[in-house]
Amino acid sequence: MKLIARLSLIVFTSCLLALSQRAVAAGELPDFRGIVSDNSPAVVKIIVESRGGGDPHGQLDPEDIPEYLRRFFEFRGGPPQQRPRMGMGSGFIISTDGYIVTNNHVVEGADSVLVRLIDRREFDAEIIGTDPRSDLALLRVEASDLPVVKLATAGELDVGEWVLAIGSPFGLDYSVTAGIVSAKGRSLPTENNENYVPFIQTDVAINPGNSGGPLFNLDGEVVGVNSQIFTRSGGSIGLSFAIPVSVVRNVVEQLKSEGRVTRGWLGVTIQDVDRNLAESFGLKRPRGALVVQVAEDSPADKAGLRDGDVIITFDGKDIPTSSDLPHVVGLIEPGTTVPVEIVRDQKRKTIKVTVGGLDADDSYALSTGGDDGDRGGRLGLVVETASPDVLERWGINGGVVVRDVVSSSPAAEAGVLPGDVITLIGSTPIKSVAAMDKAVEKLKDGASVPLRLIRRGSPMFIGLKLPD
């Protein structure tokens, strides 16, 4: 019986091997050998030295490398009494005269940057410019006739497409991993809640040291820069994120010419449109970016955008969710006038907006009166006119403060909370209890209406539905 079982296993294994070989022969599985041989010479290992004392963010510390792997690594200099911190990453050459792309977090805080090629040549690199918002950096080495990679044409990557990464995970030079594109347009806000990169999500194995390395398509073109991973273990679990080539091109061109990056800026605070809000705005389905607040004297303000507008296309590009708007606006050259399609008062309208500029160092956050308290019977709210102190605190020119919410009322079901300051019902500004009473009185039974309110200083919209 054991002999039969072994023979069966051998036959089964042989069948699997034959099927695999046939699949490869039929072109069903990709052959990466040509991509690797053609592009590896232009992929570089980056070794960073920092004397600042802190561990460079996102970089690989030799102390984190398992003991049995340390013999593979080489670090510059002897062991001084106060040993400098070392970091490693990857990058790739984009021009024969020595321009190199990598991640900002690879070289951030660096005192010196060493670039090592596959043929073991080493060059000291100059940091031409960095862009923390996109996590990109541009370096240059003094050399000529260097091997280069080709950047893909933006917008040609599809979900399910095979991709390949080359880099130095844990310092293991020129390692190659492959996978597929899992999703596009992923939003990963920064610590400052900025969201200018529509990340490519892949299941390619990316680990510390791969940061800044290229992501290739099957044509051997760079479609992204490996930047982040999601992990609970410190290693790859199949969730990696790359900066798309459209962003790379834009940032590199500006760093080359100006040494800094200026992005398109609109000057609005936005939120997603849920099902209730979609109904209240007359949309057939949830879509677009709902304008919660317009910054004074911003491009949006000058163009006539208002609180409560829903942006559904910008410069001809669809805006499925609010997180898609910064991706589109950020790539537009400041000073460009573009069409913006909005929904206002349940009607579509197109306005022209001249996009402003957001410099690298700029920061814009886009994120009891004389009346007696009154009960908004139809909504189930107890409100009072906001005092001058409240108006000044939240930077608004009118509103009513919610003091109580009747249980099981339309307001309670919509999620209105005590302390919220209501500033808009539908398209009607609310500056007093009397104004609110008048606006509520005009609402039709069964209607869905958007409420704009300030909650702990943050403006937002919620959808409220009245009973039939």
Image (cartoon, rainbow, N blue to C red):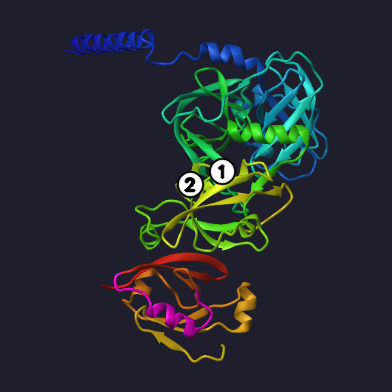
Total number of numbered labels? 2
Q: Percent from the top left, x then y, of residue 344?
A: 47, 60
Foreground residue among 357 and 103:
357
Q: Which residues are magenta?
A: 429-446
Residue at 46% in and 51% down: 288
Q: Earlier in the sequence, mark 1 or mark 2?
A: 2
Vertical order, 405 against 3 (above or below): below
Foreground residue among 153 and 223:
153
Dot 1: few (<14), some (14–19), or many (≥20) neighbours within 10 Å?
A: many
Q: From the viewer's perspective, is 253 left or right of 416? A: right
Residue at 77% in and 19% down: 97
Q: From the viewer's perspective, is 445 left or right of 381? A: left
Q: Percent from the top left, x then y, of residue 207?
A: 56, 32
Q: Is residue 456 visible?
A: yes
Residue at 71% in and 32% down: 253
Locate the C terminus by quadrant: bottom left
Vertical order, 394 against 338 (above or below): below
Task: Give the structural element (helix, strand or loop) at label 2.
Answer: loop
Q: Which mark is residue 328?
A: 1
For label 2, the residue is 319
Q: Is residue 87 visible?
A: no
What kind of residue is marked 2?
A: Ile
What kind of residue is marked 1?
A: Val
